[in-house]
Amino acid sequence: MTGQRSIRGWQKLANFFGVVGYILLALEWVWVAALYLPLLMDNKIFQEYILPQDKAISNDTVAMNEPSLLLTIVAVTVSLIVIVTTAIILVKLPLKFAKSSHKIIKQTAEAGIPIFTRHQKITKKKRKLLTARIALWLKVSLAIIPLFSLVGVYYIEPPVPLDVYMIVSLFLSFSVLIIFLLQYVVAYLKKIPSENLL
């Protein structure tokens, strides 16, 4: 019984690394998207069809009265509900995000199995092993691909200084790789099955 609890504790640690890895991976892709966002905003087609057009603004003044006690109580109550709901969402969101990311990675890996096996039949054990390996390589690829955006930095003027952009990009990429490496090391050392990992 104690051994089972210990394995669950190690599995939670490995999955914690998975959650952090997926969050850092998303942050890395957002960082890359932020680099190219000014290019998109300068695009004439984007400005014409996506961004809202300027409209005439009226200069009418509105007289402000002091709010009633009932209105103040309702506003404070709604504000508290929004704050509590936001706190709950912020606590649960990382795990939901990691589970969704893991599901997408796993489905992609399973869809890629026929390519690697050349449409030959394989056993369930080999299928699980191949799925885990493809998922690992997908994670590594998704962490490394944004580094290729560093090439584009030389051709455009990034919104942040060039050295800052490069340092943050490299830091995020290597952090993702190290976090996922820690996840797989814990899983390997404690013999946690790959299907139990996020």
Image (cartoon, grey):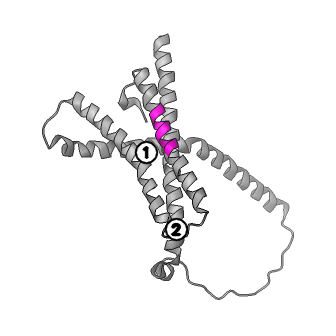
Picture residue at 23% right of the left edge, 28% below the top: 125
| CA neighbours of label 2 inside 10 A, class few (<14), some (14 to 19), many (20+) | few
For this orientation, the residue located farthest to the right is 66
| 132 up-or-down from 78: above or below | above
Task: Tell me where residue 3 appears, x and y as whole percent.
Answer: 47, 12
| 67 up-or-down from 106: above or below | below
Task: Tell me where residue 21 appears, x and y as whole percent.
Answer: 49, 41
Give the residue type at disc 2. Leu
Main secondary structure of the magenta stretch: helix
Residue at which label 1 appears: 100
Labels 1, 2: front one: 2
Give the residue type at disc 1. Ser
Q: Dot 2 lies on which element?
A: helix
Image position of 66 (left or right of 124)? right
Residue at which label 2 appears: 37
Q: Which residues are magenta?
A: 174-182
Picture residue at 60% right of the left edge, 85% below the top: 54
Locate the C terminus by quadrant.
top left
